[in-house]
Image (tube, grey):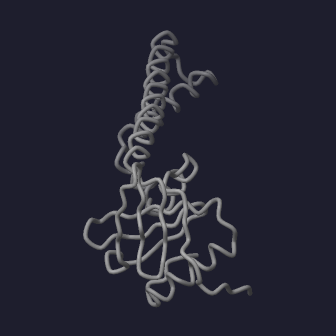
Amino acid sequence: MFRMAWRDDLKVKGKPTKEDLNDVRETVRSKMYWPKLLLKNWYGLAVLGILTWATILGLIGKAKLNWEGIGLVWAVIVALFSWSFYRARTETVREFEQLNARLPDWITVADKGVTLSGPDGATGFLPWNHFSGWREGRRVLLLDRTQECGFVILPIGELSESERQGLRELLGRIWPSKNQGR
């Protein structure tokens, strides 16, 4: 296996793409997210199941239904799902724009910590003791903050595998027992 010694600071873009943010969601989301979501909305699923069952019984001739009423109920359900989907998409776009406006332009990872470089020359430095560990997704690496229950997003989708491996080795030296990468 190829090993790269950490020699230089690694500078990555601070503005994640939409694909990077999707990877952040997947990395942060718990494995039980979808089952919990379905269980929280069991009543809606139950009504949808009953309506589907009744519609199927009506289609195969086992039940006599008011098709105008069933059609209206299905139209309302489709409209609600469409509106929810549209609203979630527009909200995601708005949140993405607001997030990118607040994030630094460049993030530099070095032996001493992380330097955040924003517009107009604004910089900030976070030593490694401000972080508690790290998690790696397909396109991002998340540095978990200790005090704020948040994280710093490192978009690593454009880095070569040797640069990623060097970053993993650095983080593995900082947190030998908390290596949470792949």
Where is residue 14 drawn, in percent x and y? 49, 56
Q: Residue furthest left?
A: 147
Q: Is residue 56 above or below residue 165?
A: above
The quadrant in which residue 5 appears is bottom right
| Viewer-nearest residue: 73 or 138 | 138
The quadrant in which residue 123 appears is bottom left
Where is residue 28 drawn, in percent x and y? 44, 61
Q: Residue furthest right?
A: 1
Q: Is residue 139 left or right of residue 50?
A: right
Q: Give the residue at x 36% y 44%.
A: 41
| Viewer-nearest residue: 12 or 134 | 12
Looking at the figure, which quarter contains the N terminus?
Answer: bottom right
Q: How many marks?
A: 0
| Viewer-nearest residue: 53 or 156 | 156
Q: Residue furthest front?
A: 121
Q: Is residue 162 above or below residue 64?
A: below
Q: Give the residue at x 59% y 63%.
A: 156
Q: Give the residue at x 45% y 74%.
A: 134
Where is residue 59 drawn, in percent x and y? 61, 22
Where is residue 74 drawn, in percent x and y? 49, 21
Looking at the figure, which quarter contains the C terminus?
Answer: bottom right
Q: Is residue 41 above or below residue 166?
A: above
| Viewer-nearest residue: 62 or 38 | 38
